[in-house]
Image: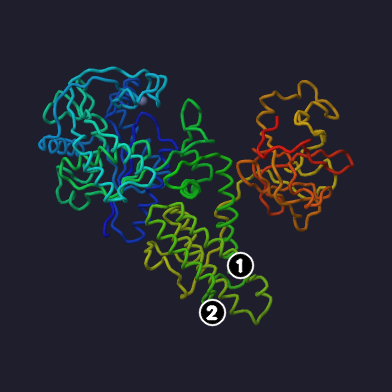
Amino acid sequence: MTRFYLTTAIDYVNSRPHLGTAYEKVCADVIARYKRLRGIDTRFLMGNDEHSQNVYKKAVEEGLDPLAYCDRMEQEFRKTWQRLDVSFDDFIRTTEPRHKTGVTDLARRIHDAGDIYEGVYEGWYCVSCEEFKQDKDLVDGKCPLHPTLSPEWIREKNHFFRLSKYQQPLADHLAAHPEFLQPDIRRNEILRLIEGGLTDISVSRAGQSWGIPLPFDPDSVVYVWFDALINYASAVGLGADQALFERWWPANLHVIGKDITRFHAVIWPAMLMAAKLPLPQTVFGHGFMTMNGQRMSKSLGTVIDPIEAADRFGPAGQDPLRLYLVKEIVFGSDGDFTWERYDDRYNADLANNLGNLVSRVTAMAHRYRSGRVVPTGARSDQLVRVGEQVVNDYQRAMDAFAIHDGAAAAFRLIDATNEFIAATSPWSLAKDPASADRLTQVLFDAAEAIRLAAVLLEPVMPSSCREILRRVGAPESERHFDRDGRWRGEGERVLVQEGPLWPRKEQTTVSDNATQPATVPPATVLPATVPPAAAPSAAAPSAAAPTAPGAADRISIDDFMKVELRTAKVLAAERVPKSKKLLKLQVDVGTEHRTLVAGIADAYEPEALVGRTVVVVFNLKPATLMGIESNGMVLAASPDGGKPTVVGFDSPLPPGTRVR
Ligand SMILES: [Zn+2]
């Protein structure tokens, strides 16, 4: 393959992009950047969908000419994509003349083929979806996506596309080309839909001015969905520039949300078949982003501004965001975003892991070798093998659009490099003059492993990886996978030692040197205001507190309910080395297993806790104690001068039971 043309869905401009919109663009951008890294001539298209009645209405509401409104929104979208480092090559707006040319051309081709005919449409129309709805699509007479609106009953002259004629050709195409629709779950849905029978669809709206007139009936405009799909072809010269069109069409990949799979895997290929144009190679329907498990919606307050998410980690904060979106969500499945988890992954993957590794290796290279390292002897075969395996895994994953696996593969090399440093302990080698060559080679190998990981991660975190490559002495401006995506055992590396790439995001941190029960780390053991009683209701803070707080200090039930208490079963327990107070626990909280640290070692032998049901604060931000990340806290009562007693129950309860 010498060229790769990929697109994303074009966006309605009646609101600014939210994190769900950004998710799609970032994932497509990672694929585009990977293809460029592979030396493939790549064209990455994005754009805005402007011929929507919702856009028109929004412009009228704001007292603007619709085009002026769209101009303004284009700037909003471009600003967001720039902040997220999305590297599109072309940006199309459906109000552009080139798009009108493409739509006119395609409509004429289908009409000439006899696949558009005139009729009367009578039925339901959801204005918000801008979709014609059949009775079976409605729930209690309402559009399921817009239950607060009533669909309109319309009767108007429409032009219809003979979609029914393409039922069998579409089924045949999907059967012959399993790569056409991915992931598999989408293909199965669409196959069932096609088998259920396809009906002809209206492709025009009568009596509207905002849209592209039908070439054979200028009093009607092209229906917005029919119009929008054609952007992929009009952006590469359909109807205007035959050479450009032949160079880039058909597209290799349409990245879209799963909700619009039907348009892209049924209607769009049927339109192209009717126009006798080649079909795109692959349609990939990604999943939805949720916030704290809820659909992103303005009214629910669950819409996240991607610029705010990027700014959270400073000027280069787009890279932590991109890594989260790519690595934490299986591409093709739904994924969730919470600010807590975002901070947590930032600290775990970047501050504590990759960033810390770069700092340590560059610092040791400076301390022991003035920043210059050259190969001096036998390289670490084991680390080289991990590197080679990771490159293979990465390439296989990225070629299959499993970008989450690609990112995870690169992190396996980072983990292996951390282990390599721990195992070789350069600080010990530095004390022994006989190990001088060995030390230089260890530092070289570590720098090389970081270089290789940064090359693999560059499509995900472009600017951060360029900075890492500069620091490990590989500052070439342009990367080529065949040359740079393999272990390189030669050449001098001049390493640069600078401040941390990703300073740790501050969280509740506590010290372990407490001696008095009253100063037991607050993140591990609740202060002595909770009675040691067994009944769940006894956890109410005022019930048996030694000194009842004054009314003004009392909290509301809403405040209390913010603390999510759950039962948890202790699966494993061990002492934290060098700590008299802390135990490390593995617990089952019903939905997952967690590690947490509890300051109860002076009261409990670890073995005595295994199998017990305890109460944990489930929604506590993670905190790191003695280098262990604690995700939650065990409730215990700590009487003055006495040892803590964990809160328990008369009889066992299943893990994950809410305590309130
Ligand atoms: Zn609707």
Residue drawn at 39 percent across, 22 percent down: 139
Q: Nearer the viewer, residue 11 or 159?
A: 159
Amino acid at pointer 1: Ile
Q: Quadrant of the N terminus?
A: bottom left
User: Which residue carries the number 1 mark?
Assistant: 421
SS type, badge 1: helix
Outermost residue, right direction?
Answer: 641
> In what quadrant does ligand 1 lie?
top left
The number of numbered discs placed on residues in the rendered structure image is 2
Residue 589: percent from left, percent from top: 65, 42
Using residue 63 as the reference point, say whether residue 324 is left or right of it. right
User: Which amino acid lies under the numbered mark 2 shown in the image of this protein?
Assistant: Ala
Judge whether 553 appears above or below 83 on screen: above
Q: Write the residue at 60% across / 75% down.
A: 439
Residue 546: x %, y % from top left: 86, 30
Q: Nearer the viewer, residue 372 or 422?
A: 422
Residue 330, percent across and down? 46, 47
Label ID, residue 378: 2
What residue sits 81% from the left and 52% below the top? 605
Q: Is residue 512 above or below residue 158?
A: below
Query: Could you tell whether 184 is left or right of 249 in the image?
Result: right
Q: Position of residue 376 (x, y in %)?
A: 54, 80
Residue 343 placement: quadrant: top right
Q: Element under label 2? A: loop
